[in-house]
Image (cartoon, rainbow, N blue to C red):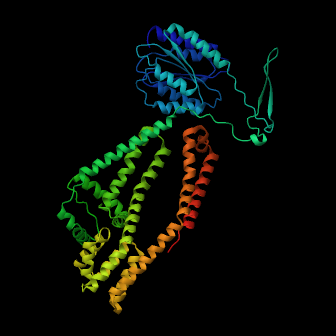
Amino acid sequence: MKGKPIADAKAAAGHFVRLMGSDDQISVIAFSSKPNLVADYNSNKKRVINSINAIQASGETAVYDALSLAARQIKTSGLKQNYIVLLSDGGDTVSRTKPLICIDQLRALKVPVYTIALKSPEFDIGTLENISSQSGGKLLQAINSDELNPFYSRIAEQIKNNIEIEYRSPGFDTKDIDLDITIGQGSKLLHINAAYQNPTFLDGDKAGDPPVRIKPIVDNWLARSGIILVAFLTSSLFIYGVIAVFTRQRSLLKQQMGMYEQIWSQAQNGNKNEPSDTNPYISKALGVIGYLAEKRGFVELARVKLEQAGLPLRPVEYIFFHALIVLVPSILLQVLFSKLALTLLFIILLTILPMLFVQVSIDRRKNRFNEMLPDTISMLAGSLRAGYSMLQAISLASEESKPPISDEFKRVLSETRLGLSIEVALNKMAARVESDDFHWMVLAINIQREVGGNLAEILDIVAKTIRERETLKRQIKTLTAEGRLSSYILIALPFAITAILLVINPGYMSLLFTNVLGWIMAGVAGILMIIGIIWMRKIVSIEV
């Protein structure tokens, strides 16, 4: 905008300033490559007009940066009724402020933007129309700069005619409200009389909230959720690609020797997990992570959990990939939306999910182990009757059984071949699998080895007892199925209703997240939900 258009724009803006009231506070922001506060809020019209006349056209166009600066200035001004009058060709080229963030700022302040779109070679009506419609303002299109004066006059007239009156009446129990308003002074008085129904009045059976109109148009938050989902999937694929590139498939011989290598390396290095990657960068990263994690005890904790879950990962590798899963999507989210609270919530969620996955894997592996245990014990008893030794019986069970029992018994054999006694190896296995039934079996074997007796008969009794307990557990699970289903429905119901209301009426639900009382209510509801979940689990869970 140069030459005659900028001169006409200055003259029209000066004309607008003269039309405003003597008490109106006016601020001027000029923008090219970046916004510049030309005149702060003041009612001195001459000073404001001089500031406008001093503006020079140069550089690019940063519409959103200028609007963001205006929103910040309005927020700190303390003025109750604010308007923004924007003159531009709409061709935003260099703004750092994202359009969604700028519009959110204006909507939060409830500031309408009256936009005058001046046609030029860089004319972009879409940008200006979006600003006006989203902020509750109006858009006026000028074909040339000669039309600016009438447009500014129309905007000034509309702003001057907008009067906002706030009055808090104690008559909340009155059905009809009569208003008698007098505006002006002396001989220039305007009388207004109006009547309307009290929206807060509760009339017997008709009490309740007024009907809510469901908006058929999808709000912007849905688009943002889609972007978050795409970013998460992209980062997950990136992490998977990194794992696929730097993780080599082991040969059959290495798979067979893996358990021996692991036990031997633990014996030589004092259970330290040294990275063995051929890539020096990966080795260095894993070494640093392993050093920091081992000082705080994370490596040992991860080792125990990974062994119990049966996952083929070293502790340092798990910690490394866990950190990647948390950091990459969280950084993308913060860069895209600059919402610290949402990013922190995302970090907490991504921190919990891998640990939850490991715990679910542990529980599933433990359940499979307990299901296969009675048959395995019967196999051991039969082998002992056939004349096998305990080690030979365990070897046969490791070959004939399926994972996870076969894997655990193979590890017991490996440990005994490296010098551990069978009692110690079985006790270590019982500690790993955390199975009460297997612990009783190991206890029976140890007692028999000390006091003597028919071990095959003892194992048959243990297997029979475990089967009877499993039968009783299944019966209890069947009898409590209805209660468990009811608890699942009751737990999911508040979250489902919240999600539905967020979709069909986000404005109604926004009070729960933008108001202090709403935060308190949400916090109390969360605490009560946790208490209710624990309570219901105690009711439907019966220990055998």
In the image, 401: left or right of 478?
left
Residue 52: percent from left, percent from top: 53, 16
Q: How many marks?
A: 0
What residue sits 59% from the left and 52% below the top? 523
Quadrant in which the N terminus is drawn:
top left
Vertical arrangement, residue 424 with respect to residue 535, above or below: below
Residue 11 is at least partly visible in this image = no
In the image, 346: left or right of 423?
right
Residue 108 is at least partly visible in this image = yes
What residue sits 50% from the left and 31% below the top? 102
Residue 128: percent from left, percent from top: 49, 21
Residue 44 quadrant: top right
Vertical arrangement, residue 50 with respect to residue 266, above or below: above
Q: Viewer-proximal residue, 519 or 19?
A: 519
Residue 277 quadrant: bottom left
What residue sits 48% from the left and 9% below the top? 144
Residue 514: percent from left, percent from top: 59, 42
Residue 355: percent from left, percent from top: 41, 58
What residue sits 80% from the left and 39% below the top? 173
Residue 39 quadrant: top right
